[in-house]
Image (cartoon, grey):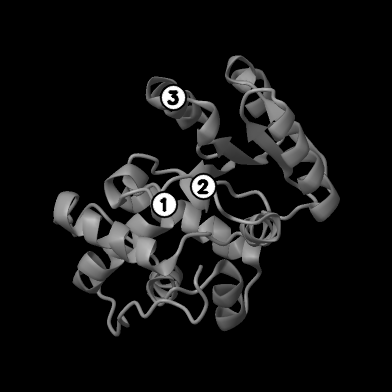
Amino acid sequence: MNQAETTSDSYTLLLISQPSMSVSALMTCLEKAIHSEVELVTPDAITDKLTARPGLVLVDLNAFDDIATEQLKQSLIPFADQHVFALLNAHDLSAKELASWPFIKGVFKKEDEIRHLCYGIEKMFSGEYWLPRHKMAALIHYYQQHHQQAIDEQAIVLTNREQQILRHLVTGASNQDIARALDVSEHTVKSHLYNVFKKINVKNRVQAVFWAKSNLSLIGSTGLEAYPGTDDDHR
């Protein structure tokens, strides 16, 4: 997670793929729809391109076989805190497959229309996740089954504000929702989340929700609400 503002003004859009006519056509459509340049990044250029300014990075799974995808995943891990990542042209990934990409904040399927893709990109630029509710629920269940950890109450100290933010996170609130509820800026929320994620040793929002539901009451917080999902299909 990065403390930089996640807005289309401060982020660039990068597409990790291989050059082809279909990829060029997609980039042209995206540029027209979101009024922003899209830069193609091939696997051999990842280090050079991703060390520049923060970006929203689309990983085109359609361009790589299983072995290349695994190699690509490992090469992106060092940049997890600098960029916002989403999977493009994904099949119906299982919770285990999604969990193997702990830094991913969005998933777009092969059949998604360009308007759906652009809407999701704008939401992610605003700091939100782009995952169907059932996938979020499946991920939380997966972490419950495979990553349950008892906390050391002496080792983890969360401030009152950090605990407040975690409570809101459990309800499915976006960064914008939390900022409005606590009367602070979105940047302040992102900074607190960055610190919280480091303290509780999680990589993403879904892991943080599971951790909070399992452990937050043990360090003095009360009133955690059940995770209800959202009215629309994504959060």
- How far apart in space, not on screen, are marks 2 and 3 (Cα)? 28 Å
Q: Are circles 3 and 1 on residues that touch, CB within 8 Å?
A: no
Judging depth in this view, the residue of 223 and 15 nearest the camera is 15
For this orientation, the residue located farthest to the top is: 44
The mark lying in front, picked from 2 and 3, is 3
Residue 52 appearing in the image: no
Residue 175 shown left or right of residue 212 in the figure: right
Q: Identify the residue shown where x is 47% and y is 60%.
A: 131
- How far apart in space, not on screen, are marks 3 and 1 (Cα)? 26 Å
Above or below, comparing residue 133 to residue 40 in the picture: below
Q: Residue 60 at x, y = what percent?
A: 56, 35
The mark lying in front, picked from 3 and 1, is 3
Answer with the quarter of the image where residue 212 lies: bottom left
Q: What is the three-letter code of the residue carrying label 3?
A: Asp
Decide which of tag 3 and tag 1 comes sooner along the chain. Answer: 3
Decide which of tag 1 and tag 2 comes sooner along the chain. Answer: 2
Crowding near the residue tagged with mark 2, few <14, some 14–19, many ≥20 C-alpha atoms within 10 Å? many
Q: What is the three-letter code of the residue carrying label 1?
A: Asn
Question: Which label belongs to residue 65?
Answer: 3
Judging depth in this view, the residue of 174 and 131 nearest the camera is 131
Above or below, comparing residue 51 to residue 87 in the picture: above
Question: Which label belongs to residue 1?
Answer: 2
Question: Which label belongs to residue 20?
Answer: none
Q: What is the three-letter code of the residue carrying label 2?
A: Met
What residue does disc 1 label?
Answer: 204
Secondary structure of the residue carrying tag 1 is loop
Q: Residue 151 at x, y = what percent?
A: 18, 56
Q: Identify the residue shown where x is 36% and y is 80%.
A: 228
Q: Identify the residue shown where x is 34% and y is 49%.
A: 202
Decide which of tag 2 and tag 3 comes sooner along the chain. Answer: 2
